[in-house]
Amino acid sequence: MDLVANLEKVLYQYQTAPPVQDLRIQGWRFAVSETSQVKAGIRNNRLGDVYAAPSLTGNYAGDLLIVWPGDYCSQVVVNNKIISNLEQMLPIWKQGAFYDPEGSALLDPAPLPLVAVEHLPVRQAVTEDPKPCFEILARYRDELPTWQVNTIQAGVQAGWGLRHIRTSRGLSVTYAQTNFSTFVSADGLFGKGFAKRRLPTEAEMGRLIKETGETTCLLKREGSLQPGRQPVIFAPQLAAEFIAKFLLPNFSGNSVINKQSAYTLTDFATQRQVFDPRISLEINPLRLFELSSYLCTREGLPARAEALVSKGKMLTPYLTLKDSIKAGLKPTPLPQAGGLFLNVQGDFNRLITTTESGILVYSVLGMHTQESVTGNYSLAAPYCLIIKDGNITGRAKAVISGNFLEHLMDPATEYGNVPEENTPGLKITTMVGAA
């Protein structure tokens, strides 16, 4: 807290009575997180192995906007060292400032919502006793071998800290937040994780371990792939990757304004129908203990739910304050930690049981190489599960290709929700080739 107080003090001093007149600040804004984290892991079945040794770390990290006279701006990333040497950095930042009249805008303070972003048991695991972290790792080690899993890799991370947001216009917010994540991989064939601001429940841990064990067993059976156009089911974790790759950048206000998106401002103004009417897409930072939840954006905009697409029709891109001024629209909440929610109806298990012939895909290789704007993809899926008459018969390698944006327009695409998963699974029809 001392570092944050010093940061605010120095900025206020250089705004009101700078020691050097040429360094007078017109306005400023910062968002800094002060975080402590506990980490532990399993490597090759060994809890606390040298390559996954338990650790406790702490740091400050965030971003700072300085507005100089004449609408010149400096936007920088800050950490412990930079905050401690702020006065030495100011002349350097002033020299590198750029003219940005839209970027110099600052929001007035506004009432903030109540959002559950701190879970006391996670805080205690970081500040008092990390026992829950080791209990989860021990469960992986002890329970997964009952599914004939031979090699386990796993990790747990718990974090607690304070989020500080300040502006020269009077906004002063500090709130506590937690994060918790765990991931386990079995025999290098299948991995699954959990990530929220709270600890997993007993039921959630049971389902995670059971799905990991059962899926790994299925992936050890050899199957026979029939190439060609056929139903392909994306598991929820893979669907989330597709949303992050193809929807998140295309709904960015900055991308839309700079014509680097599949969509235009006119598409939003006319509420163009881009998806099937069953689909709604929203940002919702108010959800209980989700990593995507927060009280306000780093710019100080209060958290609220915001629909980007309703019944397949476009409503708005997500917009920072700067982008909103350029677009002539209101600023919106911003997605954080995968915080784009696809709202649809359906049951995931039914996607499988109603498939006569197709494949189920949990993960792919090469997602980072795909081109977001077009929606086209061609990806290797080394561990697919083959479905025959609603039953999983074995494993195969495949290459899947298609267009994700077109899948969301297709009325034949089916969706299936899974308890505790934020993203539904999808069943699409697309090309499948042998790998």
Image (cartoon, rainbow, N blue to C red):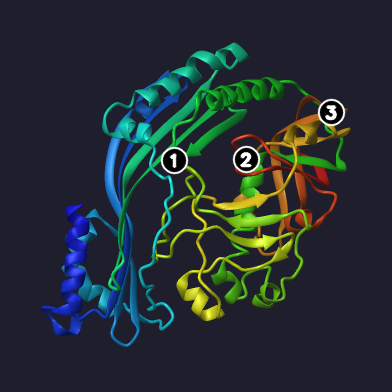
Q: Earlier in the sequence, mark 2 or mark 3?
A: 2
Residue position for label 2 = 237
Mark 3 element type: loop
- Mark 1, residues whose alpha carbon is within 10 Å: few (<14), some, or many (≥20)? many
**Percent coordinates x, y for residue 338 in the rendering:** 54, 50
3D distance between C-alphas at marks 3 and 1? 36 Å
Residue position marked by numbered label 3 in the rendering? 390
Hey, which quadrant is residue 362 in on the image? top right
Circle 3 or circle 1, nearest the eye: 1
Q: Where's residue 57, x and y in %?
A: 28, 39
Q: Is mark 2 on a helix, strand or loop?
A: helix
Depth check, front residue: 9 or 223: 9
Q: Name the residue under label 1.
A: 197
The amino acid type, in three-letter code, at marker 3 is Gly
Position of 402 with respect to 263 (left or right) is right
What's the residue at 81%, 48% (across, down)?
413
Which of marks 1 and 2 precedes in the sequence?
Answer: 1
Give the quarter of the image for residue 403.
Answer: bottom right
Residue density around tag 2, few if under 14, some if 14–19, many if 20 or more, within 10 Å:
some
Residue 75, horizontal then vertical, whole percent = 35, 70
Label 3 crowd bin: few (<14), some (14–19), many (20+), radius 10 Å: some
For the view shown, which residue lies furthest in the left direction?
19
Q: Please give the label number shown on residue 65.
A: none
